[in-house]
Structures are given as structure tokens and as C-alpha cells.
Amino acid sequence: MKSFACLLLCWMASLGAAEDRVVSAAETAYAKGDYATAVEQWSEEARRDGVSAGLLSALGNAEWRLGRKGRAMVCWERALLLDPRDPVALAGIRHALAAGGTERPAPTWAETYASFLTEDTWLILATTFFWVATLCVVIPRLRRRSASEWNHRTRVGMLTLLALCIPGLWGGRSLSARAVVRKTEVSLRLTPTLFGEPLNGVAEGDVVRTDRPLNGHVRVTTADGKAGWLRTGEIEVIRGATLPADLDQKAAP
Amino acid sequence: MRRFLASTMLLFLGLIAQAEDRVSWEITPRVTAPGQPFRLQIIVESDIVLGGAQQVDKEIRPPRGLALRLSGQIVRSDSNEATLNFSGVAPDQEGEYVIPGFNLRFARKIIPVTPITLIVRKSAAYRRTAQARAELVLPDRTFYVGELIRGAIHLRGGDDEAVVASFGLESVAEGFTFAVTADRQPLPTELGQGMRTSFDLTPIREGTSELSLRGTMLIQNMDSTAFGNGNRDRPFTFRRKLSVEHVPERGRPADWTGAIGTFTAEAVQVSKDRPEVGEPIRLRAILTGTGNLDRLIPPEVPSNEFWDVLPATERRRHAEEQRFFVYTLVPRLPGKLLTPALRFSTFNPLTKQFSRIEFKPVEVTVTGNAPAQVDLVTADPSAPVGAKPKAATGLAAPAPQRGSAHFRGVPAWSLASSGAFWSSNALLLTALLSLTAVALSLGYLAAHPEIRRRRRARSIVRTALSTTESARRRGDRPAFALAAVHALQVGVAALLDTEEAAMTQGDLERVLPGVSRPLLDGLFGQAYGERFAAEAGATGSPNEEETLALLRRLLSLL
């Protein structure tokens, strides 16, 4: 118990220290308009300490300022995976859609519903509700006793909450199945082949819904509903490890 | 002396009588129908040689709605008679129209003409479609200052007459600007033979004004002979009072710049849809419709973060009722950009409502690299000197330190895509379901013990069948009977839910009705007879086939 209290105190102290942090060099560089330095320092911080929603959204802002729409959109979308209500990421995406010429599929009602929580949170909640409801059903039978009134109430409550989680799960699944176009001049192809007939142009920063992969291509659907194939290297899935992939860097031999 | 005076007086009176001018006129037909052409002939007889008439048209003042034109005069140089012919068209309203008295100015004398009355009656026989006629096409509604009103005069041929020319169009339109846009154009096919003169009117002041138009058309009779051309002229005149108002101030949008009419935003075109950063492209918005297109002020399009917007010259195609707004756009950033939106308000004089015209932005893919920094700086005159200008952008201020460092990290995979998560849940669920099923089964069996008993009985009967078969092959009759009786007792006990040792032949008959009593006696005697008497076991031998059939019958009941 003592060790637990010590750990809690240490954690609280570190939180307090975090609140008192001074403005970082990256923030200063961003404020001065030196966005390249800001990107460099925030990326270094992310690689060193891991990313947070605030850091990713700030990085997205700096990338946008540098005109790298694809990287910016990836940062903002990943920030929303961590915190669906991150104001900086939301403002960035809104700005990119309104004035930046990027396109993003209009969220369905299930996706809007799912955006209240993260996808994993929805799943954890649904699993918890499911198991509680299941145990409420099973345990009285195993004990060969009739279920109490409390058991019935818990059972109904859990099943109701589970039903409320289902749209969130569905929306979270479709939210995860999206990617950001990373190349500037990309054409949607009719077939997943090297010389597939170009159907429609998509621009860097556009968000597309992804479908099945085939032959080094991924079937995608654009915001205006046009479906076709893009090369795997032309898009970056929103759910990723940390920072946006550096597509300019050549792979090691 | 008296005779001399009398003769002088007679001579004087005779001279006076000789000097009186005689003027007579005739209208053909005498009574006209509304809109019917007529001919007025004036015959003058004088005491002197008259000479040619001069400026007769200038003095004659026909009443409102009546068209009248001098079409010819017959004057002989050595005669004191003159004949003047006028062609006219009766007004459209019934009544008596008086042409005020006027003077006929001849070379040597001025002859006054008394007022002439034209009688217009609807009852007069007249087929309007037979004659050539003029029609004014002008909307009958309230007009607005600055509006462009399209009007036309249709000179339509009739069944008996064709319009071959027109000339001398005069207009009096106070409070309007008047311009002929197309003269003597052929009429549309559905209107028949004739010609059309189109004009534009624009009210320039509020109030009621009168538009007066008059002219002459040259007509030709259809049945003209080969020796005469049959051409003659016919005047037309129109007078229309027009009501003009200002565009209402109530509900007038701020971006209304004088557009009156019905317009449609047709299309937006760009000269290049894949420009590079910094490469100027031309944006052309096409507006169509009817209205004062040439008076429209091109909507202002401010520069923004993505576009530099420069003014450009624009031209208009009048015949196609189109107006182009042209801008030069210079992209500032790469990517898929939307051209700036063009919008302005218009006033529809028909519905008397303001509406908004908006050209949809066009998507342009800009290639190339972005400059290091792109900020649109908004100048604020009231800002203090040296203050840092604020960037006009939709991005929020970044807050990288927001959130705790203890919760950092984006999961590389979602929980939903984790196989371990789903397999562990499935394993747990399977185990739980299995456990539940076992518990339920056990509980059911505990609640229904007859299931077990019958199962056991079935097993015993099946074993007895095989035992009896083997005993029969061996010829061991006691073993055969013992196994059969035991099986019968167990099976019947399971069906009657009683103890098997207590089963008697009577119980067997209850469960297996119609069973042979001697068969049972034989079986029971051979099975248990030795317990009571040594020779009892040898008395009678049961039919083995019947016994086996009985066992199978019992097995089917279990």
C-alpha cells in the first residue's frame, strides 16, 4: 500500500511539473514562422517521448504551413485517433477542407457517433458490457438459483449499453478504414495494374476510404464517391505507428 | 346711275362668289373598324392656280392613336384644283376621332381645311388578318430605373398584303434611353410574313412617362397585276404610358450592384486546370439571362491564402445574352485548390424579389512546390505602429503540451485488429458456454431420472438380445431364458418407473399387451423354475423367435 501511494505521488508530481513547462524551442520557432525548425524539433520530441494528440496536431499545423498537405492531414487524423475532440486538429481539418482544397469523405451518422470516443474505447466498453451481461445470465444458472431483481436490472442495463456501443463500433471501424493521399499527382486507376486507366485525379491531402488490397494497390473510394485503385505507396493509412511516413526517403537496399 | 350701281354690285358679288375656295374630303371606308387602314382624300378647288402643296404633314395633328400620313398629291401646274391623298390606320378604340382643322400650304395660296371626323365602329366589317398591320411588343408591367427593357415592333403581313419594307421610325420617350438594336429583321416563322424592329429601353427616372413610336411600312398587295407594282405605304403609331419605380430598398442585399433581370450562373472555366505554383491562369465565369447585363459591375474577389486575384478585362457577347467575368488567378500553394467563389445579388422585376447568383468554385490541381511561408497579411489601419500583423488563417494555435505525457503513444494497431483479443474472448466465451451447457444438462438429468433409467434399460435389452442370440446358438436354454426375462423385467420396470425385481408377468402384459401367456410362463419357468423345483425348469420350452421379437418390441418402446 505504501509503495502504491509513493507511485501515485510521483505521478502527480510529474503531472504538476508538466504543467509548469516552459515554451519549447519548437513553439518559438513556429511562432516566428520557422516552420521547418518546428517540424524538426516536434518530430524529434515525438520520436523521443512518444506522441500525444496536442503534439500531432501542432506538427500538422507546421506541416500545413510548409505546404505538405498529406503529412499535415495524417498528423491531424492521428491526433483525432488519440483525442477525437482535439480542437487544433479539428480546426486544421476544417481549414483544409474549406480553404485548402482537400477532400474528406463526409462522415456518416455512425462515424459522427463513434467520434465521441476512440475506437479502442468503444471496443473495451462493448466487451465489458457484454461480459457483465453474459455473467449476469450465466451465473444464476450455474448456481441453480433464480436471478435476483438486481441481476435483472444489471442485465438489461448492460445489454442496453452494449446496443449503444454497436454504432460506435461500426463507425470506428469505418473511421479506421481510411487513408490520406500522400503524393501530389495521383490518378485513381480503373484496375490495380501498373498501367491502369486513370479515372480521376486525387490530390495530396485527400482522405479516401480504403477497401481490399490487391497486387500492390488498394481499392479506395474518394469523397465524391468515385472508386478506383491507388498504389500502396501513394497513400498512408490513418492508423499508424507515430509520425507520418517519410515517402521521400528511399528504402534501404 | 342706279343701274350702274346695281350692275357693279352684281359684278362684285359675282367676283366674291368666284373667289371662294372649295375644300371637300372623303374617308374610305366611311366608317372604319378599330385598327383598319383607311384612305383620306382632300380635294381643293380654288380660283387661282395653286401649285404644289408644301409641308402638309407638318401641320396636320391627328388625334391620339390615329396614324395618318400624306401618301401623295395630284396638282397640275395649270389647274386650280389639287387632290391630296392620305393613308391612315384607325385607332384601336371605338369612337369619333376629329382631326383638327389645318392649313394646306400651296405655292400660291394657303387653303384652310375644316376639322375632319373619322368614325370608328366595331360593327364595321373588317378582317384584321387580311391587312398588313403593326404591333408593339412591350411588357405590360411596372419597370425599374436602370432596367433593360427589350421591346419590338412587329410589322406583320396579312392574307392580302405583304410587308416589304419599313422606314421613318421616330421615337419620343422622355425619361427613357431608346436604342434600336435590330432593324427590319425577318419575323419568326410562327408569326407569318413580315419584319421586326427590336429596341432597348432603359428607364432613367421614376414616375409615369410616355413612349411614342411612329413610322411607316411599305406594303404590297398580293393580287397586284403585272402592270402595276401595287405598293403603297401605311403609317403606324404607338403611344404607351409606362410606370417606372426605383428598385425597392427594403430587403435589398448589400452586394446588389444594380443587376435587374433574370440571370443564371452558367459555368466557370479556367484556362488551365493543372497550373504550377505562381503560374497565372484565367478564370472566366459565364453569366446568361435577360437583363441589364452590360451594366453589371463584376463582383469583387479578394485574394486569399491560396490565390492572388488580379483584375482582368472582360468582354460580352450581346447576341447570345451572355456576360463574362474574367479574373486572373495566381496559385500560391500546391495541391487541389478550389477557385474563389463569385457571388452577387440580382433583382427580378417579374417576381419583384432579390435573388443570389453564385458561381460554383472549380477544382484546380496546382503542382510544384510551396514557398517557405505563405501568409495573407491583413492590414489594419487602426493597429498600433510596430504591432505584429495577424495571419488570416483557419488554423488554430498549436498546443503541443496539452495532455499528459503519461498517456502518449498512438497504437500501431487497433484492439479490434488484435487476434489475441478476439481469441481470448472467444476462448472465454466457449468455456463459459460449455460450463453452462454441462450444468444445464446435469440439472436436467437430475430433474428427469427416467431418462437415465430408460437409457440403462435400453442398454440392458440390447445386451440381452446379443446374449440370447449367442445362448440360442449354443443351445443353452436356461441362459437364454434368464437373459430374456431379465431384460423384460428391466425394460418394463423402466417404462413403469418401478423396481425391476418386482416385475411380474402381469406387469409385462400391461406394458406389452397381447403377449403370449404360455410364452411368458415358459420363459419365467425356465429362468426361475430351478429356484423352486428342479424339474420345473425343464417343463415346456418357449419359442425363441417369439422371445426375440418380444425383446425387440420392448426395445422400441424404450
Image (cartoon, coloured by chain):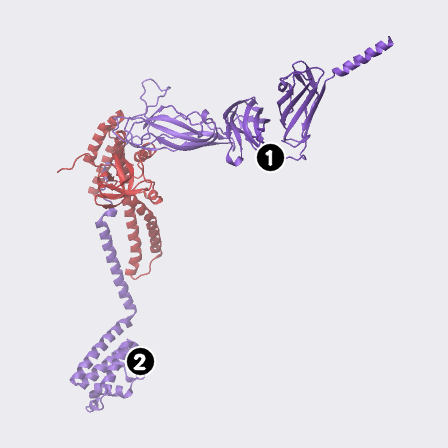
Label 2, on which residue? B511
The chain containing the residue under callout 2 comes to B
Badge 2 or badge 1: first in the primary sequence = 1
Q: Nearer the viewer, residue A187 or B153?
A: B153
Residue A74 in view: no
Chain colored purple: B
Residue nearer the viewer, B147 or B374: B147
Q: Could you say where residue B399 lies in the image, as x and y percent from the top left?
A: 28, 32
Q: How many marks?
A: 2
Give the quadrant of residue B29.
top right
Name the residue nearer the viewer: B161 or B173.
B161
Colour red maps to chain: A
| Mark 2 or mark 1, whichever is nearer to me | 1
Q: Eyeballing the image, is A66 above or below B105? A: below
Are there few (<14), some (14-19), or many (20+) residues within 10 Å of tag 1?
few
Q: Which amino acid type is shown beneath numbered disc 1?
A: Ala
The quadrant holding residue B254 is top left
Q: Position of residue A55 (x, y in %)?
A: 25, 34
Q: Position of residue B374 (x, y in %)?
A: 29, 26
Q: Residue furthest front?
A: B227
Label disc, if present, on residue B285 of the rendered structure:
none
Residue A119: image x %, image y %?
A: 28, 44
Q: Secondary structure at mark 2?
A: helix
Q: Are marks 2 and 1 in contact (CB under 8 Å)?
A: no
* Amino acid at pointer 2: Val
- Give the alpha-carbon distance from disc 2 to disc 1, as whole Å: 119 Å
Q: Which residue is mark 1?
A: B130
Q: Residue at x 77, y 13 (%)?
A: B15
Q: Residue lying furthest right in this view? A: B2
Q: Does the image show residue B169?
A: yes
Q: Please tell me whether mark 1 sits on a helix, a strand or a loop.
A: helix
Chain containing mark 1 = B
